[in-house]
Image (tube, rainbow, N blue to C red):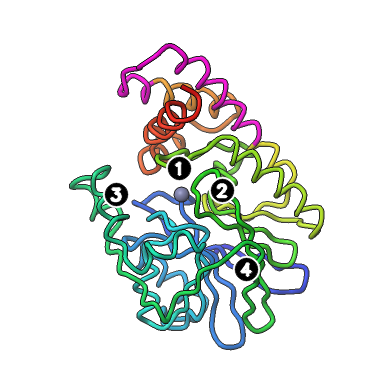
Amino acid sequence: MTPAHTTRSGHAVHTLDLNFQGVARTIAAYALPHPEGVVLVECGPGSTLSALEAGLARLGYGLEAVTHLLLTHIHLDHAGAAGRLARLGAHVYVHHVGAPHMLNPEKLLASARRIYGDEMDRLWGEFLPVPAERLTPLHDGDEVTVGPLRFRALDTPGHANHHMVFLLDGLCFLGDIGGIRLPGTGVVRLPTPPPEFHLERWRESVRRLEASFREHAVTHVAPTHFGIFDDPDAHLAAVTEALDDVEAWMEAELSDGEPDVDELRRRLVAHTRERVLAAGFPARVWAEHEAVMPTAMSADGLWRYWRKYRG
Ligand SMILES: [Zn+2]
């Protein structure tokens, strides 16, 4: 079991590896015990519910011990199991723009099914609606207090329009606005899926995080992909570097009219691979990661953004 991180005020934060599609350190859920049970930040997709259950069991909890579930956003790899946990008694907190999709996920699931087709169930598992009485929509600056734990939600668009980070006691749960940090490195790559990736909003969110990290003396960051790191400023600098990189890539690849989408995906995958391998990330681990968290989809998001805002 990964040893717990201890926050400034002495709260334990356990990183649960959901071992998505059999690959370690790709999707995390964070578990914080409190006197009445356990808080989760993120719960992963329905397909990794048994890994979540096993991770909680190692801490001495069942799924029904989850009292509060904080979601950074509603994408399937973060929020898929929320409806199941809500039925077992958890109260769910999510950005107010994403909340309607948790109550009524048909549209969200239909658009995911268009992307994943027959692979949908194998990849993501069940996605149950969250009952209204178990859902609280969050607005910028809202606080969620659970016993001694006090989380503050910050609206942080760029990866999605319905994205929150959560500050707790010197630790910031970054969701996907902190990118995907490749294990064992300081390298970040950006998940830029359609339809909401927005470069300037993402940069604005990073600037906001830099300021709030100073204000709240943040010492640790926890991107959902993957783990808790003690270099918040370096992490944000790596996110900015990755934003600069995708912007330069878009300018080079997308400026001359309509590209071939398959070719675009291939070029982005090759470019990203080169970038992360140059930073010392092992090729074998890259291949494993890429198999379950494909860069190809990010090309679609970049192209959509470019057409809409820069084309
Ligand atoms: Zn996401």
Residue occupying the point 57% across, 62% down: 2
Residue occupying the point 34% across, 73% down: 84
What's the CA distance linking mark 3 and mark 4?
A: 31 Å
Secondary structure under the numbered disc 3 in the rendered image: helix
N-term mark: 1 or 4: 4
Mark 3: C-beta under 8 Å from nearest atom of ligand 1: no
- Which residue is denoted by mark 2 in the rendering? 157
- Which residue is denoted by mark 4 in the rendering? 13
The answer to whether marks 2 and 1 mark residues whose Cβ atoms lie closer than 8 Å is yes
What's the CA distance linking mark 3 and mark 1?
A: 14 Å
State the mark number for residue 39.
none
Residue occupying the point 56% across, 48% down: 157
**Secondary structure mostly taken by the magenta-highlighted segment of the chain:** helix
N-term mark: 3 or 4: 4
Camera-nearest label, 3 or 2:
2
N-term mark: 2 or 4: 4
N-term mark: 2 or 1: 2
Q: Amino acid at mark 4?
A: Val
Q: Decide if residue 218 is on the left or right side of residue 137.
A: right
What's the CA distance linking mark 2 and mark 4?
A: 25 Å
